């Protein structure tokens, strides 16, 4: 208990004596814009790393054998018959347009 009373008295005495203990003629100023202490040099800038190389993967070509295409004799005969009919029809159209009549039918 004696300790707490002594500490309280010490704190009370310091707080009452503090305003009277100011020194005269001492100014406190804070300088804005005045350089302070600088630690280290200027910042170091590094160039960005080069981009990674571009990789293009080309697939290997795939070769497939050709499919044989042929007519059998029956299909060939029909194709030839259709071709001859178309030629005959075209010739009649030509004669009708050039001579003005339809060929064998209009004689």
Image: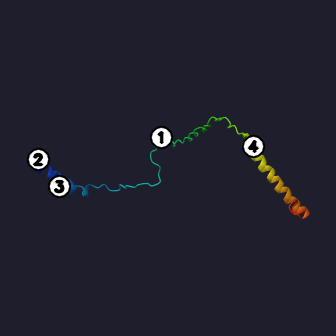
Q: Residue at x 45, y 55 (%)?
A: 32
Residue 23 appears left or right of 107: left
Q: Quadrant of residue 95?
A: bottom right
Which mark's residue is nearer the viewer, 2 or 4?
4
6 and 47: which one is in front? 47
Q: Are marks 4 and 3 in contact (CB under 8 Å)?
A: no
Instruction: Name the mark on residue 81.
Output: none
Q: Quickly name the residue at label 3.
A: 12
Q: Are marks 1 and 4 in contact (CB under 8 Å)?
A: no
Q: Is residue 107 above or below residue 21?
A: below
Residue 68 appears left or right of 49: right
Residue 63 appears left or right of 107: left
Q: CA distance from mark 1 to mark 3?
A: 47 Å
Q: Are marks 1 and 3 in contact (CB under 8 Å)?
A: no
Which one is earlier in the sequence, the residue at label 1 or at label 3?
A: 3
Q: Is residue 67 above or below residue 83?
A: above
User: How many other residues sit within 10 Å of disc 2, few (<14), some (14-19) or many (≥20)?
Assistant: few
Q: Quickly name the residue at label 4.
A: 76
Q: Quickly name the residue at label 1.
A: 40
């Amino acid at each position: 208990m004696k300790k707490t009373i002594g500490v309280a008295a010490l704190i009370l005495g310091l707080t009452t004596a503090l305003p009277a203990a100011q020194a005269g003629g001492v100014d406190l100023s804070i300088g804005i814009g005045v350089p302070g202490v600088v630690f280290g040099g200027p910042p170091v800038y590094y160039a960005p790393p080069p981009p990674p190389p571009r990789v293009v993967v080309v697939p290997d070509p795939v070769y497939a054998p050709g499919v044989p295409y042929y007519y059998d004799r029956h299909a060939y005969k029909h194709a030839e018959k259709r071709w001859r009919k178309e030629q005959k029809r075209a010739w009649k159209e030509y004669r009708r347009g050039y001579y003005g009549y339809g060929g064998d039918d209009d004689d």
